[in-house]
Image (tube, grey):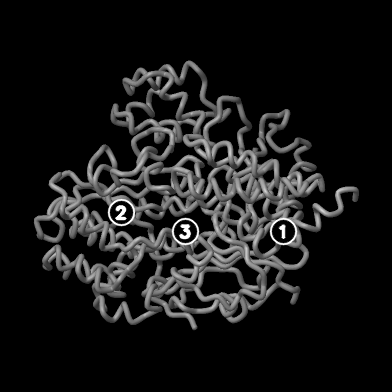
Amino acid sequence: MLEDILKKHPQHEDSLIEILLEYQNVKTKRYITDEEVEQIAKYLGVTESKVCSVVSFYTFFSTEPRGKHIIQVCKDVPCYVNGSGNVLKTLEQLLNIRIGETTKDEKFTLEYTSCLGNCDGAPAMRIDGKTFTNLNPNKVKAIISEYRGVN
Amino acid sequence: MEQKLVSKRFDAINPLSIDDYLESGGYETLKKALKRDRINIIEEIETARLRGRGGAAFPAHVKMMGIAKEEETTRYIICNADEGEPGNFKDRHLMEKDPHQFIEGMIITAYAIRATKGYIYIRGEYDKAHSIIEWTLEEARKKGFLGKNILESGFDFDIEIRSGAGSYVCGEEFALIESIEGKPGRTRVKPPFPTQKGLFDKPTLINNVETFANIPHILEMGGEAFAKIGTQSSTGTKLVSLSGNVNNPGVYEVPFGVPIKDVIEKLGGGSKDGRKIKMVQLGGACGPIIPEYMLDLTIDFDRFEDFDSKTGAGAIIVMDERFDVFDVLLRVAEFFEHESCGKCTPCREGNLQLVKLVEKFINRRATQKDLINIESLARVMHHTSLCGLGQTAPTAILSTLKYFRDDYLDLIEHPEL
């Protein structure tokens, strides 16, 4: 799978972030392993430490296995003053995990995110590539059951 | 009160339809611009006195003229769509609701400075905007507005999208350049400036989405007419991102010079449930927090500099009486602690210490000495940090030390509570 993605990108250092983003998005456990770092470094002709420095710098990349769906809850001020605390509480109760953890069935990982730029629909959260706005506990419950149902 | 220039097509056209854009006069300015003298275009921007809309308010024509004078012929142009400042979402609206507009501005600018390639750097969280821009660029290519020999003018230019990966500091111009180059987003020491040695060490022009969106309008109406909108120091309009405890949060376009109070009351419908406004943060996490009695302040680059701060990109975050100054400060401090790139000491260590100091106040363990320390640390960070992140990270603290000093003193004076 990684090989197919690598082939699509030019063998230049500046393809690195695009490759990592694309690969991590389709990988089941949404993380990058040491072996993959090695493979990417080799393809781009850069050192492994260079790839590692990028993986560790950007919040989107993980070196730990994560759930199939990544739920990101905004913790910044516009969401906070519109009740993001309740959104997080509801999610933690529903999924029975704390922020930063993955559910036992490996379906969901709960993370904080910096502002999602949806402050006009605060509080907001993002699941994989989709943003949900104007949240309240009931809406959060409905969204999570939908994600559970689909799988 | 609203004056719609860059937002005039919002919700009036189908953003995915290039025909809608063309029918509303889109790309007409580009057609005319390609027949104009390049320096003449930059002079028109100078007459308009357009200042950058991404927060720093730098005169747009100065950067353009700087590049135009460089000897190097490989030149890049970058649209900074890494809108990560908490409380800002106007660039998302510009990209999702009228995507051709800023791209047209980008092509015109590229022509004026003879740029050979363009990049749009979109933050990773903006999934929808990303796919809309991808589609929009393809549509523009099909009609010959991008690619080889644009509209038979002999000018070759194309744009590539690059995605951010969750790093706020990549909105800073050199961090952004490093990120496009495939590196961690850490800023560089200036000078040389990007216009001299930017992306891949070539002259590079970086502008915010809204700055590019203004370009077609300036050329269409003429620099002089544009300069008549707004105030002496700040010409044109500003997109304001209004959020927090207001009835109608959203993006509003107003001419510079409008009081913040009017935006909140008349456009935003006032505070939610009629609660009293306790404080308003301007610009985003990097901006000052001011009390309600100061809301007569007008939206104007120079007025904002009175706070030792920039206008930011035009965010207004309203917070009502239920919220405590320190709860907000802690969130702001934690945000910067997380987002600091770690390159320079004042920012890396300073933000860590600011979080600890704010927590000390919240836990009522702060002493008079902590008050002195937080103030001097904030000033040192402001003056000595390498880039805008560290320089503006303590703005909220400095402003609250000025306008909400009693809140600090209250927490010191009763340590036993």
Say which of B70 and B140 sits in front: B70
Q: Residues within 10 Å of mark 3 (few under 14, many from 20)?
A: many
- Considering only vertical position in the picture, is A70 above or below A27? below
The numbered mark, 2 or 3, whose residue comes first in the sequence reads: 3
Chain letter, disc 1 residue: B
- Tell me the element at label 2: helix
Q: Is disc 1 on the same chain as disc 2?
A: yes
* Circle nearer the viewer, 2 or 3: 3
Residue at (50, 17) in percent of width and height: A34
Horizontally, residue B390 falls left or right of residue B112, namely right
- Viewer-nearest residue: B335 or A28: B335
Q: Which mark is residue B247?
A: none
In terms of sequence position, does the residue under pointer 2 or pointer 1 come before the other? Answer: 2
Badge 3 and badge 1 both on one subunit: yes
| Residue bearing the label numbered 3 | B92
Q: Position of residue B308 (x, y in %)?
A: 51, 61
Residue B304 locus on image (x, y percent): 50, 67
